[in-house]
Image (spheres, grey):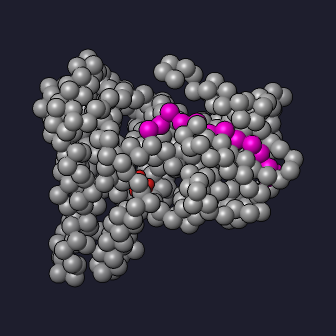
Amino acid sequence: MGNVDPALEVKQLFKEKFGHTPTHVVKAPGRLELLGNHTDYNEGLVMSLAVDKYILIASSPRRDGKIELVSSAFPEREIFSISELKKNPEAPWADYVKGVLNELRRHNVHFGGFSAAIHGTLPMGAGMSSSAALEVATATTVRQLYPFCITDTGSTNPPQRDKEGALPEMSREQKTNLAKLCQRAENEFVGVKCGILDQISSLFGKVFHAIEIDCQTISVEHVPMIGEIAIIICNSGVKHSLVGGEYNELREMCESAAKKIGVRALRAVDLKMLTANKAKLNEREYQCAYHVVGEIQRVIAGAKALREDDFPQFGQYMFQSHESSRDYFKNSTKELDLLVELARQHPGILGARLTGGGFGGATINLVKRNAAQVFCEFMAAEYEKKTGIKMTPLLCQIVDGAH
Ligand code: GLA
């Protein structure tokens, strides 16, 4: 695989499995949560990056009303008709696709059958949201094959192709509606009560920019992230699966804390209010709320630091965020804590924290660019020395979202 263009690889996979060339190829990037852990479903603020690790789908329409999926990561082939979107425990990866198709149908989007080959350059279970990237790639595949335009509740006039057959770029509103649709697919079909961070990030990525999301209004701003810095992922190698249930439990803690305080979501709570209401909460509710309230403040402060190009200050917020996840939210692992502590020992580090849902997965490291190479070598060697686990740090570029 190595340096081969993944778009060629996915086309090749399609050709091998279906015997002809695909008509369309789309790619949706994975995301890195930069700052703001578990703030999204609390209607809070969060910063993320879309990065150059993707889910790609090559596709062609077909006339028999069937959808047939193959994947480079799983051996089984999945075939079903549009009117029969049911979970198959033998191919749980296909649920993300079916969930999106199901939501599109609920929005009255008319689409026909298609064959699709799925290929990823995104490490699965690393907390880089391969699931949201698959959802977004599914939605953009259907848009390419059977153009549509959705509103919050239904669909409107589809976009027109130009002379070359290309579709116009999606508006902000379209991207937001699509992100919500994909999130609903994951919440309702797959059963993970995730927030909107991952889907928004995969659609709203912008090269050299961080994405700042206000999850109360679902509005997005782009903050330049240009400088002598590198973004490096260290995957702990400990598998992370959101379907595991811990995620939904944390969300329930936050929601019951908000309810007992008498607000719709923890976004409405500041530290003073939390302290005043401490007696109403059990210990876990208080700890979770304390983390979320602090994280939202850190995102505000972090966005300011980024706008001032103050990367050392931003890095400090990343370290603080990790400590809060570790000590209060308790969604870290000993491997993630070790990765952050090792990173802290290196002179090239600016900031490090766990990224994404937690309970395994990866850390995101903000590193001085001229130290990137030695940092990677240091982390790989030290992590293996301490755990026996071989780990290859990944350098990530910030990229545009799916289109
Ligand atoms: C996962 C979820 C997101 C978000 C993060 C934690 O990635 O899918 O919605 O809650 O965890 O910030």
| Residue depicted at 45% across the width and 43% down the height | 124
Q: Quadrant of the C terminus?
A: top right
Q: Nearer the viewer, residue 153 or 79?
A: 79
Q: Quadrant of residue 61?
A: top right
Percent x, y of residue 377? 24, 22
Vertical comparison of 369 with 188: above or below: above
| Residue depicted at 50% across the width and 19% down the height | 3
Q: Given the current orientation, which residue lies at the most extreme right position?
A: 63
| 260 to the left or right of 57 | left
Ligand 1, seen in the image, is in the quarter at bottom left
Q: Quadrant of residue 290?
A: bottom left
Residue 194 seen in render? yes
Q: Given the current orientation, which residue lies at the most extreme left position?
A: 345
Magenta: main secondary structure equals strand
Instruction: Check residue 247 for magenta coloring.
Output: no
| Residue depicted at 30% across the width and 32% down the height | 391
| 80 to the left or right of 290 | right
Residue 96 seen in render? no
Q: Which residues are magenta?
A: 111-123
Q: Quadrant of residue 115?
A: top right
